[in-house]
Image (tube, coloured by chain):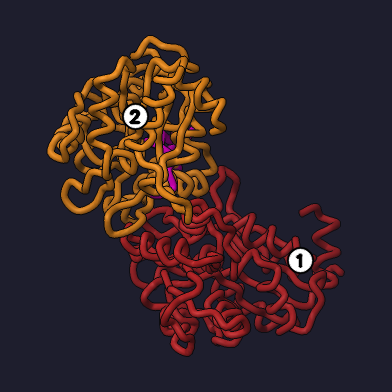
Chain colours: A red, B orange
Amino acid sequence: MAEMDWKHTIRDLKGVVLDMCGVLYDSGEGDGVAIDGSIEAVKRLKASDLQLRFCTNETQATREKFVAKLGRLGFDICVDEVFSPAPAAVTILKERGLRPHLLVHDDVVPEFDAVEKTDPNCVIIGDAADNFSYQNLNKAFQVLIGLEKPVLFSLGRGRYYKEMDGLKLDVGVYMKALEYACDVEAEVVGKPSPVFFQSVLADMGIQPSQALMIGDDLVNDVGGAQSCGMRGLLVKTGKYRSAFPRANALSICERMKSSRGRA
Amino acid sequence: MAEMDWKHTIRDLKGVVLDMCGVLYDSGEGDGVAIDGSIEAVKRLKASDLQLRFCTNETQATREKFVAKLGRLGFDICVDEVFSPAPAAVTILKERGLRPHLLVHDDVVPEFDAVEKTDPNCVIIGDAADNFSYQNLNKAFQVLIGLEKPVLFSLGRGRYYKEMDGLKLDVGVYMKALEYACDVEAEVVGKPSPVFFQSVLADMGIQPSQALMIGDDLVNDVGGAQSCGMRGLLVKTGKYRSAFPRANALSICERMKSSRGRA
């Protein structure tokens, strides 16, 4: 972002939306690790006059478990501040009277407890990780190809994410696989879907131009937010891969503070 | 195919290329089952003045094991008559000095015995079936994404095939997954690659217009052959899905005989 754009953005800012994995922490064995400065960055944003929300495509746990994990890492975050795809998908299913076949991580299944799942008429895939076996993907395919009009929901469209022991395939890869198998286009729930960002803006009660999305994914975080009229900023932590120096959440937070001070 | 086109095709015909799975047999537990009339169709073609070859994207076994299985089902077929992607891939690897990371079915690994595989600089995927675990696909992804210029070979690009207990995902689905993950385009070895069909034509020593490809896949068999100038014919067995009556290999064989008789 050019210097003038940055100053303009910061002056009008009323809310910040933070991606979580790769911005606040790196995932991996156990709870993963907080990224240097990110706990302090969240503290400073909460102490500012800006509204703060968290927007994640995390679908390996319920929001409650996910927030508890972040608490153990040192973050002060409430469940209501976190927007994730599974609850958004449940809303869509209820609105449209759909009964899903789920191919998701075991730990996110409880998000769908209140949804009828017998005789499925759609398929939902999330970041199922080890549950993405050949057998399970084939079962999801068979449900889809057996429907008169296959309906596929994907909780995100990410290509990969970073864990402590390396890059890992994300749900978008399996979305492409099923799209090709059944010659359908998936409906993406979560980032970069505009509907998803709009629900966050509505919750904050602010206009898109008053909100800044900070993430480590150029397409799903920055691109998705920008296509809604929000500002987007790429951190150089998480999955960001480049020879350039790293910009983390705290360095951006400090830069915002100094820019607002000058404004 | 219109009646006049059919007569013209049959009159000039010097060779027939048969797809195998879905045309000769349905795969499944054990050896699978021969499709009604297909053993007789192969016999009649062999007894005719037409050359006959078999062209399969089968990559769940070496050609030797595959031909032995077909023998047990009642087919009289030699290894030299069968064209499959793995030997074609080995030729390419040797020509280009490439060392593959393999994500293939255990039973096809011996086809690559003579190929150097340490410090891989490309990835080959075949119809790995249960070997398409999350862990194995992630490993292939990590090799690819770690290469300065990722090179991905896919032994076919099929979406699915039919086994006795239902439709099963084919290698093309996982090709699309890795293409998306790494933002690369795979090189397809096998049908519908023109190079693959041309190697069969060269072996028969005939022109494309003198050859008829018979298969159950509109894209990989019929479309692939037609894009090489061959004639293509779709059987209504195997993965063919429609409310129309079934045309099998034998009914086509009988129709060819009567057309040639009239020609």
* Residue at the (35%, 31%) spot, across then down: B253
Q: Secondary structure at mark 1?
A: loop
Q: Say if A195 sits above or below B76 in the image.
A: below
| Residue B146 visible somewhere in the drawing | no
Which subunit holds the residue at mark 1? Answer: A
x and y, in percent, of residue A169 in the image: 44, 55
Report which residue position mark 1 lands on: A228
Q: Which mark is residue B55?
A: 2
The kind of residue tagged 1 is Cys
Q: Quadrant of the C terminus of chain A?
A: bottom right
Give the residues in magenta.
B145-160
Which subunit holds the residue at mark 2? Answer: B
Instruction: Calculate the distance from the C-alpha at mark 2 to the C-alpha at mark 1.
Output: 50 Å
Relative to the observer, which residue lies in front, B21 or A5?
Answer: B21
B113 relative position to B101: left or right:
left
Relative to the observer, which residue lies in front, B2 or A241?
Answer: B2
Please rate how many residues cluster around mark 2, counting C-alpha atoms within 10 Å: few if below 14, some from 14 to 19, many from 20.
many
A66 relative position to B124: left or right:
right
